[in-house]
Image (cartoon, rainbow, N blue to C red):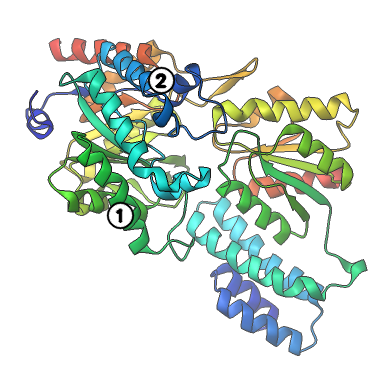
Amino acid sequence: MELFRVRLAADRVLVADGAMGTMLMERGLQPGSSPEAFNLDRPDALEEIAREYLNAGAEIIQTNTFGGSRLKLAQYSLGDRVAQINEKAVQAVRRAVKSNAYVSGSCGPTGQFLKPYGEVEPAEMMDVFREQIGVLVSSGVDIICVETMSDLGEATSAVKAAKEIGSIPVMATMTFDQTPKGFYTIMGVTIEQAVKALEAAGADVVGSNCGNGIDNMVSIAGECRKFTRLPIIIQSNAGIPELKGDVAVYPETPEFMAGRVKDLLDAGVSIIGGCCGTTPAHIRAIREAVDAHKHS
Amino acid sequence: MDLLKQIAMALQCGDSDGIGELLQQALDNKLAPKEILDRGLIAGMNVVGDRYKKHEIFLPEVLLAAKAMHMGMEKLKPLFLKDEVVARGRIVIGTVQGDIHDIGKNLVAIMLSGAGFEVIDLGKDVPPKKFIETAIEHNAKVIGMSALLTTTMPIMKKVVEGLKEKGLDGKIRTVIGGAPVSNEFAAQIGADGYGYDSVQAVDCIRKLISLS
């Protein structure tokens, strides 16, 4: 497998995987328990999920470590299990994908705010990410993916922590809402501020994930492109969920999302994957649309 | 500037230290605690809410204002006489069972007490039964529920249905909020209201209570 940076520089489009949460639920994760605690007992399920996304055509497979920082795990009284939880997640994905896909270490928000808005000191935030990302890297991920961030201080802390550790490529994405005045994160960060600060912190790939559906992502990608020459990653939700019976259902179908792939590629996106509500079927449809676009 | 206006302004800036000093000055000047709350703190919080609604400010500014509000309330609360308790109604609030995400819920709780409601915060991972029993026991007018995970959204429906079974629909109102829920979802499960954000949630609860 080519190095991730080489692959990106070759100006080819990559497909990443989709949602993790629902796949875990299908394999027995109970609502209210830590999704990452699953790594300790059910690495077999993690392998299975990784394999499904690999078979669907994803070339970047994420680890189940979104909430794997000690601040987040502490909410489930697992703050002292950072090493095992992150290590087992990486090992499971690696066993499934071998060298057929890039293993991307997911690193989500801590759920705490930096001072003065919350109680966390900047130095502590850095330490928290150093610890988690350190384990991810030493366990053998190919990429770090800092994702679903809304606060720039927290996001750049994570990127800087990863960059300190070595030459690991870092993707960094934030989640934007549409307002009458344009796109902002809930913390009030604009796309321009996000892209510029993440690039300055050392990110190799920038972009957006989660959000309110793929149509918004086309606009967000275009906006990102204005402020950076870095490769752009987009991992969209399958829209806003609706309740069908007792189950929340995401409205955007694989066909619908695949129908926006061309727009994303035209906007200059290099990596397309999914977030909440996307399934291996979504990723397969996106894969086909990407391949069709390449050959057109 | 009028002292109460200064308090409102300090609150808007999220200046907790300033609020502490100004409240002391106001109390030394024998201003009534209720007056300080309504025309100082709440007036300031209302401006914060309005500006947030218009996207002129974002969560960081609201968090700072909420902190200042919380501090101010703590200072004033012991000074209220029993019969002038500010409560405009009692609200039971919590993050639903299976969900531990409480940043939004905490913000709504502070905004509600800032708006003069008495808030019973059940915390996170709250089972449907607990919402209903607490609301009955404390004669609450509204139950506010928050969820971030799509998998926990159905719990909201259980609370609405539980109230209906007890014949309490219309007497105890339900308001929901959180990233995956929407107005449509509220209508679908028969909740009485939906707040897109903490400001809307307070507006919505105000309206519901003025109707009852």
Q: Earlier in the sequence, mark 2 or mark 1?
A: 1
Three-letter amino acid code at the position of disc 1: Ser
Numbered disc 1: secondary structure:
helix
Q: Is residue A165 above or below residue A251?
A: below
Can residue A280 be spotted in the picture? Answer: yes
- Residue drawn at 65 percent across, 65 percent down: B70
Q: Is residue A185 left or right of residue A136?
A: right
Residue B46 location in percent, x, y?
Answer: 66, 61
Give the residue at the far bottom of this rendering: B28
Determine the image quadrant of residue A12. Answer: top left
Can residue A150 be spotted in the picture? Answer: no
Which residue is label 2 attached to?
A: A278
Label 2 resides on the chain identified as A
Which residue is label 1 attached to?
A: A157
Nearer the observer, disc 2 or disc 1? 1
Residue A168 location in percent, x, y?
Answer: 16, 42
| Of A80 and B154, the residue lying toward us | A80
- Residue drawn at 37 percent across, 44 percent down: A82
Three-letter amino acid code at the position of disc 2: Thr
Label 2 crowd bin: few (<14), some (14–19), many (20+), radius 10 Å: many
Determine the image quadrant of residue B171. Answer: top right
> Which quadrant of the rendered structure holds the C terminus of chain A?
top left
- Residue drawn at 62 percent across, 47 percent down: B105
Numbered disc 2: secondary structure:
loop
Q: Which mark is residue A219?
A: none
Q: Is residue B5 above or below residue A282?
A: below
| Of A231 and A182, the residue lying toward us | A231
Residue A227 location in percent, x, y?
Answer: 22, 46
Q: Is residue B116 left or right of residue B25?
A: right
